[in-house]
Amino acid sequence: MSQPSADTIFNSINPWVEQQTGQRLSNIEHIVLQACWDDARQTYKEIATQYRYSLSYIQHRVAPCLWRRLSAAAGTKITKNNFKTVLIQQLANADRDRVSSSSAGVEPSPTVLASVLEFPDGPVPPNSAFYVRLLPGEQRYYQALQRPGALLRIKGAWRMGKSSLVNQLMASAQQQGYQTVSLNFQQLERSQLSDLNRLLRWLCTVLSKKLNLPAALDDYWDEDMGLKSSATAYLECHVLKQLEQPLVLALDDVSELFPYTEVSREFFTMLRTWYEYTKSNANWSKLRLILSQSSETYIKLDTNQSPFNVGVRLELKGMSPAKVQELLGRYPLTLSEAQLTQLLTLVGGHPYLIRLAFYHLARQDLTFDQLLATAATHEGVFAHHLQHYLWVLQKQPELAEAIQQVLAAPEPVTLPQMLGFKLQSMGLVTLVQNTAQMSCLLYQDYF
């Protein structure tokens, strides 16, 4: 039997540890475990240097906790010297037990299922066993946040994993001792999105509260300076100046602002200015920005004033067959390759829909054949998701008409740019060279 790869081991470890002990490995414990797995001769000092942690933290806090957790899960002592052999044996035994139970028709107890399964509603929590890294080399993006003035831009359709990735990035930053603030633009009212003054005051007020700083907007808001200059002065002098550690500011779903053209232009040019300041000012160098958006930026911004052409771009396009297989390994569930292919054909690698399917199948709410037969109906497991889309399209007839154009055409069709971007941001269509086609069979069958 070939030795499992590091990825294969990691895919199995957290569910196994959680099932055995009720606790999961933290991100930093994962990092240490992976480093040791890749090269057992690597010292704690080398690991600390590579990932920019202190030697004392890795050697005296993280590593002992890691080996204790694994020892508790295995029921035998695990150390840096023997962990690989013990883990391979333990996970092989657990896999055989699972297959045997499945073959014998033994159902997992409700208690076990409750501890293992999470209903896939909203972003995946940072320490969840069901978070799968969708981006190749995702670890390097966590490391990128450690650079002064870093800017990460995350793009992906609705429920494709943007907020889950933001959560992971923020958790990693917190482990570095950084201050973190995450703001979601979906929380804003139209009156705030359409008024630059209200938008910037909201941003500064919430930022202060989340950092436990007194709000002092009136000390910095100056009509003669202008709104952007007032907000910029507030961030520099009232926020960054008081912080000893870097600040990671995540602005989630900034595409909510795109329809408000004038406000968008002013707001995003301000962000670009902040980014430029980080290169030459000590206070500003503490700032790291994360922007997430669900569609392409369709507002016109000067190249030198846009934050969308600088920094690092990350795009979430869905799960590959390998990632779907990896996620399946986190569930008390067995599916054949043919069934996985059928599921991928149905939902097109959509992470939320795949998790929803695995959740209900693992709970044995229905069989795989029943899931397929009812998928595009109001009795199926995707009903609530589909009804949400139906409600949105009923409220916006121009989008409903555009969807009908896509459905009626035998080939991808060209749509007005704004409509194409909106449907893409919803996840209903994919755009290839400005032509639209339905993103998966489920939506095609339903609409």
Image: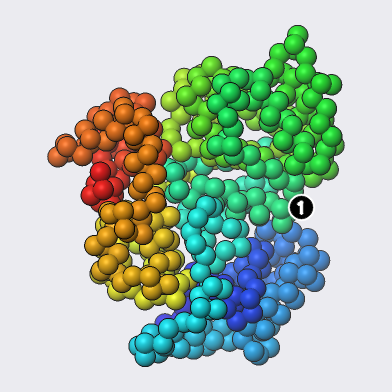
The residue located at (59%, 75%) in the rendering is: 18
The residue located at (50%, 55%) in the rendering is: 121
92 over 267 or under it: above or below: below
Give the residue pinned by disc 1.
Answer: 177
Res 268 seen here: no
Q: Is residue 26 left or right of residue 208?
A: left
The residue located at (27%, 31%) in the rendering is: 402
55 over 203 or under it: above or below: below
Quarter residue 46 falls in: bottom right
Extreme residue in the left direction = 410
- In this orientation, which residue lies closer to the viewer: 6 or 408? 408
Give the position of the N terminus as an image quadrant.
Answer: bottom left
**Residue 383: x, y in percent?**
35, 53
**Residue 117: x, y in percent?**
51, 69
Extreme residue in the front direction = 379
Q: In this view, does 397 lie to the left or right of 242?
A: left
Give the position of the C terminus as an image quadrant.
Answer: top left
268 over 262 or under it: above or below: below
Res 94 seen here: yes
**Residue 238: x, y in percent?**
82, 30
233 over 36 or under it: above or below: above
Instruction: Specify the color scheme.
Output: rainbow
Category of crowding for the residue at label 1, using alpha-carbon neighbours closer than 10 angstroms: few (below 14), some (14–19), many (at least 20):
few
How many numbered discs, if any? 1
**Residue 148: x, y in percent?**
70, 40
Q: What residue type is labelled 1?
A: Gly
- In this orientation, which residue lies closer to the viewer: 173 or 188? 188
Q: In this view, does 151 lie to the left or right of 301?
A: right
- In this orientation, which residue lies closer to the viewer: 107 or 244? 107
Quarter residue 304 falls in: top right
The residue located at (67%, 59%) in the rendering is: 50
